[in-house]
Amino acid sequence: MDIQLLRQELNKLLHEKLEPVVESSDLNSEFPMEAYRAVAQAGFGGIFLPEEYGGGESLEGLMVVMEEMSKFSPGFALSTMASFQLFGYNIARLGTAAQKEKYLKGLTGEAKIGCWGLTEPDVGSDAIHIKTTAKKEGNDYILNGSKTFITNAPIADYFIIIANSGGSGFNSGSARQAGSAFVLEKGMKGLSVSKPFKKHGHRCSPTGQIFLDQVKVTKDHLLGSEGSAFADMKHSLELERFLIGPMVAGMLETLIEKCVSYAYNRQQFGQPILFFQLIQEKIARMRMHLEMIRAATDQGVALIKEGKPATNLATALKLYGGKAAVEMGSEAMQIHGGNGYMHEYRVEMFMRDAKLLEIGGGTNEMMLQILAKNTIKEVGKKYGVT
Ligand SMILES: Cc1cc2nc3c(=O)[nH]c(=O)nc-3n(C[C@H](O)[C@H](O)[C@H](O)COP(=O)(O)OP(=O)(O)OC[C@H]3O[C@@H](n4cnc5c(N)ncnc54)[C@H](O)[C@@H]3O)c2cc1C
């Protein structure tokens, strides 16, 4: 695959279909459906899905697609990622032939929208203690419970729901081994969704609740094997964390461009503010983060392709990228002064969008905990730490 050509073609499409609606979809919290359909049907959304189901099987391509979309709208990138990666990639990895045929072709051919639901009103970071249940009754499962903060839930056609299928004695035995994933579809009896939440950022990406009231499905709707959902999700969560890399890289590229051009055109004290060293320092730090994030993302791609352990790098990149986006989003607004505080310059949108990266997909505190645990385990061995 010619990555450069992919980048150019996607950029052109996004300029045509997404750019004109970025501001209105952010201000009105509306999902840019036409742009999503264009991106899905031109093959960009499914760039990492298997070729036989309309995908492009390219990890490098996925990183480029994520970066390009994030240059225009991180919210659009988030929703597209939830559909094709959180939903689609899990189907590609774990689904039966029939599930792949139906759902992957739905995503790539018909621009259907997928979502992935783990988080619940009472269960966030402590994810393995989910309360949504899937009780087995003969050949069927009956799902009850609710999910919240789910990207795309209000507009989704397809749902992956993680539920506790621990049998009659829920939460008996290991909670980690009681999680099972189920694929559900819009219109199923007992399945409903909320309206989109009103949010701080990523406003064009609809986030909502899912309600499950006696949803009855056959075992054909089980994704992967019963009890394996938490073990199975490790890999896709790792990929999601790596995707923060290109997302922040895209955001920084746009912010750098906006800041350099604004600072050159804005005169104070008889000269462009770009010539003040305090302004240049902010631009230099944006570039520093961009270089570090690009390098870590490339390293991540190499590790994934070689099948080598990548947990610590993915975790570090998620943490570093989120912090860099928040800090640099704020600095970009600072360079724009009062204008930065106004919608029309669109730097404040990137600043609002940045904060989610410190919360969604595992909070900063959870990333720190993983890094501390792994490091102490690794290094502590030498000192008899148990
Ligand atoms: C816009 C948006 C989109 C999302 N999309 C999805 C989605 O598509 N699918 C999905 O399943 N989820 C989704 N989420 C949920 C997201 O993954 C959770 O919000 C996140 O994991 C944190 O969970 P929580 O909000 O319940 O916070 P909590 O877990 O309640 O945490 C609150 C605070 O306490 C801290 N904390 C918790 N435990 C510890 C500890 N042991 N030590 C130190 N500090 C701790 C946290 O770091 C945080 O600062 C989304 C969230 C948002 C906001």
Image (cartoon, rainbow, N blue to C red):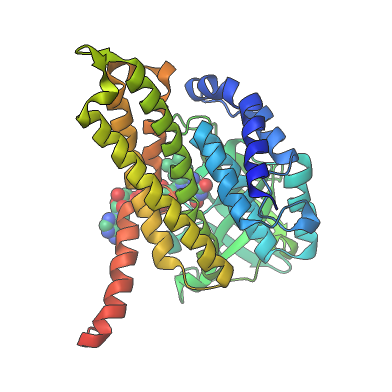
The answer to which image quadrant residue 18 occupies is top right
Is residue 299 or residue 244 the one in the foreground?
299
**With respect to residue 183, does 325 lie above or below?**
above
- Whole-percent x, y for residue 188 in the image: 71, 46
At a point 43% along the width and 55% down the height, the residue shown is: 295
- Whole-percent x, y for residue 321 in the image: 38, 49
Is residue 34 or residue 43 the one in the foreground?
43
The answer to which image quadrant residue 181 occupies is bottom right
Left or right for 192, reference 179: right
At a point 67% along the width and 59% down the height, the residue shown is: 91
At a point 39% along the width and 23% down the height, the residue shown is: 261
**With respect to residue 56, does 5 lie above or below?**
above
**With respect to residue 180, does 67 lie above or below?**
above
Q: Can residue 31 be spotted in the picture?
A: yes
**Tag count:** 0
At a point 62% along the width and 71% down the height, the residue shown is: 226
Left or right for 211, reference 41: left
Is residue 365 or residue 52 the one in the foreground?
52
Quadrant into which the C terminus falls: bottom left
Q: Can residue 160 be spotted in the picture?
A: no
Is residue 100 or residue 283 the one in the foreground?
283
- Whole-percent x, y for residue 364 in the image: 32, 53
**With respect to residue 154, does 108 lie above or below?**
below
